[in-house]
Amino acid sequence: MKNMKLQLEYVRIDDLRFGQKTEIQDHILYVNKAEAIAELSCKEFSSIDLDIANPGDSVRIIPVKDAIEPRIKVDSKGFFPGFLDGFDSVGEGTTRVLQGCCVITTGNIVCFQEGIIDMSGPGAEYSIYAHMHNLVLIAEPAEGLSAEKHEEAVRLAGIRLAHYLAKASLEAEIDDSEAFELAETDEKLPRVAYVNLVLAQGLLHDNYIYGSDAKHLQTMLMHPNEMMDGAIVSGNCVTASDKNTTYDHENNPVIRDLYARHGKDLTFAGVISSPTCTMLAEKERGVMSIVSNARLLQADAIVVTEEGGGNPEADIMLIAERAEAAGIKTVLVVHENAGDDGSSEPLANSSPAADAVVSAGNNNEFVLLPPMDKTIGHLEAANVLAGGISDALKDDGSVLVRLAVIMDATSNLGITNLRAVTY
């Protein structure tokens, strides 16, 4: 049997500017603004604009909806299967990546459920996106457009814009490449599977797997290469650090870490993606399927990442209990809501079976973000961001926030700038 092999070819982006033609020259991505906007035009938007935010700029982006890394399949010239491409070559073949570049979408969709990116100052230390060259999409909804239709229009516009940018990489020289293949390993190595929980709770708390709303899907086995190849698109309007962005799915650090150790001290057995729903019966069905699939993969251990916060912590504790009872060692990766001083109960649910937990940081820690020279979006949204405070925006333009509202500051996937310190 032929293994799935995915080749990622990286085109490094060192600067982002508007220009006469969308192209890459000397590691600078030039964007024809008028042409890009024309690609996104639709009746759902009353206006569309694009702006640029480069690392070090005195720029605040608010409210942020999603972040998307531009990628494209070299053969099909598509990406995001189920949205902009078919399914034939997902997880194999060659994919071009604009490395160091990101599309950021904004909008008052469910304003209190979005986030902040500061491109400089203390906020930049917490967000991975502050160190990227960002093309920001500002799309205002047509009058009377529902929040659901607004979210859908912004989600589709974001991936279309990322795909538009990625096309420029096909004419550029690559700077580096990596191959990902689950080659055969020593049978004596422990088998480790990754359990990827995907929020699927309705009320704009959804993700899309192969173009389908995850709340209509069941637990499924996936090859890790599928994750890197655009299988999951974020549709979440949830607290900034609760959501896993589309960029996060494309660059999932658990998958990369397990790949790096495959054949050395473990065998990467595969990925189990499972919707996180609201009803207890749905949770129990999902947990049963996760453990059954882990046993089918003959996994000795699983690594589980959460998405969301609060009721999804019932899912991860149930997984720990059922998997450990089946003889499968379980490691959980979660962020905490431990109060301003870190002394509160950090999770909404806990279990003695969860005896190996990796913390991605305390959502409730405060940081004061100084004024920026420029705001892209709506600064007044700072007072209604979930996880923040009602008087966050100060008279001088500074913003007092919890880490919860900074994009990926305490990512449940661990794709964060926070690090542990041993004393």
Image: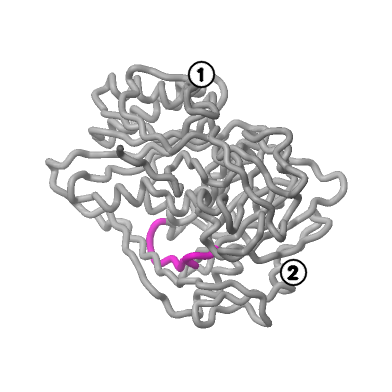
Residue 412 x/y as whole percent? 46, 39
Quadrant in the rendering for residue 278: top right
Q: Secondary structure at mark 2?
A: helix
- Residue at 34% across, 36% down: 303
Within the magenta stretch, is there residue 38? no
Kindly indicate the quadrant of the structure image that contains residue 178. bottom left
Regarding mark 1 in the picture, which secondary structure is present there? helix
Give the residue type at disc 1. Ala
* Dot placed on the residue nearer the N-terminal end, 1 or 2: 2
Residue visible at 55% across and 37% down in the picture? 242
Q: Nearer the viewer, mark 1 or mark 2?
A: 2
Q: Which residues are magenta?
A: 91-101
Residue topped by disc 1: 281
Instruction: Residue 165 in the image: state x and y as whole percent.
Output: 59, 69
**387 relative position to 394: left or right:** left
Residue 212 point in image, percent of width and height: 57, 44
Q: Which secondary structure is most common in the magenta stretch?
A: strand
Residue that numbered label 2 is attached to: 38
Q: Residues within 10 Å of mark 1 (few under 14, many from 20)?
A: few
